[in-house]
Amino acid sequence: MIAFLFPGQGSQHAGMGKDLAENFPIARQVFEEANDALSFDLASLCYNGPEEDLKLTANTQPAILTTSVAALRVLEAETGPVPALAAGHSLGEYSALVCSGALVFADAVRTVRQRGTFMQEAVPVGTGSMAAILGLDLESLDAVCLDAAQGQVVSPANYNSDGQVVIAGHTEAVTRAIEVAKEKGAKRSMLLPVSAPFHCSLMVPAGERLAEVLMDITVNEMSCPVVSNVEATSNHDASRVCDLLVRQVSAPVRWREIVACMVNLGVERYIEIGPGKVLSGLVKRMAKGSTIQNVQNVADISKFAG
């Protein structure tokens, strides 16, 4: 059984998608469609940067989505594998939904552009932060967050794998949590270079604004289930997609459970589609013995076809 995986924010880099667009008309078409949908030159930003602009949340999210879908379209055209399941990390869930046919690409890219704006505007710059906590069990981490909150928000935001969790919240509370985590034996605790505290209760206003956008989006029947970030279970019901996407903004990403779900359903081959190899690294540690492949450039397509 094959699952397609799609990366989230943090996997972006200048130059992504460029060689695919130069070598495959179908990839170039995806970038042109994004340019038309957004009324600005997203393709040039992906191909050439600058990195500072690419890191802006409102740019990052459509850029990663577009690069992922371009790679997906090439993979479909060149080799024709059909996934039994799809999943994506945070933003990557939109790529997975495009893969499943639930979302039309133009709708998805416009939506994530707004999603990125809403998430950035939900909390003033500098007010919120995120940090990675490594080597601490979940029970201890919950205690760390409870101890560090002191009337502010700090909570798990990404359950990436055993012993690798990202927390988010008010900057002061996150900073306190880093110190408490070290005291409790965390192997490593560090602030992450992000512009907002994603996937915590501070993002509720962003979710409310996103809900209004999604009201105008048509969700189609799905060709394969998508394992949602919020529930970490496979969803084949188009009527639930929008609610899950709204809740996802302020709920933690349950990637560890998403992988466990796919393993339990019988997935043995994982193909990460889009920039970077972050998800492949996580899956490799959790789904022992699985086949893991990446598709982000022409060389990957060539190996895949071979």
Image (cartoon, helix red, strand yellow):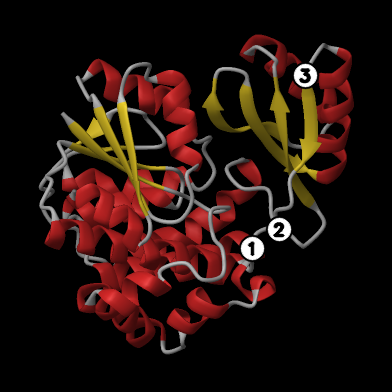
Vertical arrangement, residue 158 with respect to residue 305, above or below: above
First of labels 1, 3 by sequence position: 1
How crowded is the residue under tag 2: few (<14 C-alpha within 10 Å), some, or many (20+)?
A: some
Q: Quadrant of residue 111?
A: bottom left
Q: Position of residue 35 (x, y in %)?
A: 38, 84
Q: Quadrant of residue 182?
A: top right
First of labels 3, 2 by sequence position: 3
Specify whether 48 is left or right of 230.
right
Residue occupying image coordinates x 83% and y 29%? 178
Q: Which residue is mark 2?
A: 195
Q: Position of residue 201 (x, y in %)?
A: 62, 41
Q: Is residue 103 visible?
A: no
Disc 1 to disc 2: CB gap under 8 Å: yes
Vertical arrangement, residue 87 with respect to residue 221, above or below: above
Q: Which residue is mark 3?
A: 187
First of labels 1, 2 by sequence position: 1
Report the Cα–Cα distance between label 3 and label 2.
25 Å
Image mark for residue 120: 1
Residue occupying image coordinates x 15% and y 36%? 84
Task: Choose mark 3 or mark 2, whichever is in front.
Answer: 3
Q: Quadrant of residue 286?
A: top left
Specify whether 153 is left or right of 273.
right
SS class, disc 2: loop
SS class, disc 3: loop
Pick whichever, 165 or 213, lies toward us: 165
Q: Is residue 27 visible?
A: yes
